[in-house]
Amino acid sequence: MTGAGGVSARRRTLRNMGRRLFDSDLWYSFRASPVAVSAAIVAVLILAAVACAPWLTQDPFDLTTVDIMDASKPPAWAEGGSWQYPLGSDDQGRSVLSTILYGTRISMMVGVLSVLFAMVLGVTLGLIAGFAGGGLEILIMRLADIQLSFPAILVALLIDGIARIVLPHDLHEALTLYVLIFAIGISSWVHYARTVRALTLVERNKEYVQAAWLVGTPPTSILVRHILPNVLGPVLVLATLGLATAIISEATLSFLGVGLPPTQPSLGTLIRIGNEFLFSGQWWMTIFPGAALILVALSVNLLGDWLRDALNPKLR
């Protein structure tokens, strides 16, 4: 009976949470925005296609499934095309649709992991700077100011170049993905740190923080349990907008030839490879990966814009 009662209580809790969600201002704002709904639909379709890629198409990077005789086939609706390759094939006989699905998976993975890394680093340093103050705050903020004086893509290129010099040559390809995530993340932590530091300066002087100090709550507990939950709203907005920026940064680095290798290509690598055949009339090798990159970045950016407006109390 106890087990059945516990299950019923959990179900009631989940039901109440779902009811509160559907009655919330955030859900109403989402439903009232056709742009946000359209962007969410596009994002969900892209995520579903990427997640189901192994069942929708063959792995284009499995050499046993590639036939060089099928190289450079145009899209299915063009003359000489085949529905075996709906968006055509590349110079190695791989389906462009398959490479887009697998390349989008890699691009999104790099974007999400780099944003998580930048968010954790930036939020941590911002909390410390805003709460501790003094010389530590000055040091962190001056480091942030110095980094802001350089373009983010230049910082990422610098980190990638240092990694290529420091790491053993035989490990370059194996560690390229992790170096890319670190390079993009370390170039974008500043925005999180500055935002969280400003919010922490406001929150630390409020009554609930002063009360926590009076009852002897440790500083770490005050930061994690009291201040952090109250600064997460703007951080989530920054992370949503930063995801699109991280995906574009990865595509830029890969297009420049310092990103992922051709054996593990992302959308940027596919665009770079296809660009070499663009003027020979094989436009589909670069146009379709470029369109996929635009769709991913645009849908994420539109969702980020909606979330920023929805969480802004001045616009309610």
Image: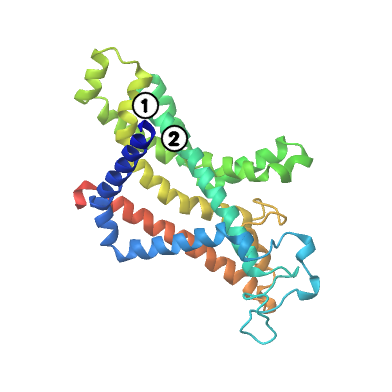
* Element under disc 2: helix
Taking the spot 52% from the left edge, 41% from the top edge, the residue there is: 185
Of all residues, the one furthest to the front in this rendering is: 1
Q: Nearer the viewer, residue 252 or 297?
A: 297
Residue 8 in which image quadrant:
top left
Q: Earlier in the sequence, mark 1 or mark 2?
A: 2
Q: Say what amino acid the circle numbered 1 marks.
A: Val
Q: Residue at x 41, y 22 (%)?
A: 136
Q: Is residue 223 above or below residue 166?
A: above
Label placed on residue 304: none
On the image, the x and y values in percent for residue 235 come to 37, 41
Seen from the viewer's position, the closer of residues 285 and 44 is: 44
**Residue located beneath label 1 in the image:** 224
Residue 282 location, x and y as percent?
Answer: 67, 76
Residue 177: which quarter of the image?
Answer: top right
Residue corresponding to mark 2: 122
The answer to whether residue 26 is above or below residue 88 is above
Q: Is residue 284 visible?
A: yes
The x and y percentages for residue 139 are 43, 25
Secondary structure beneath label 1: helix
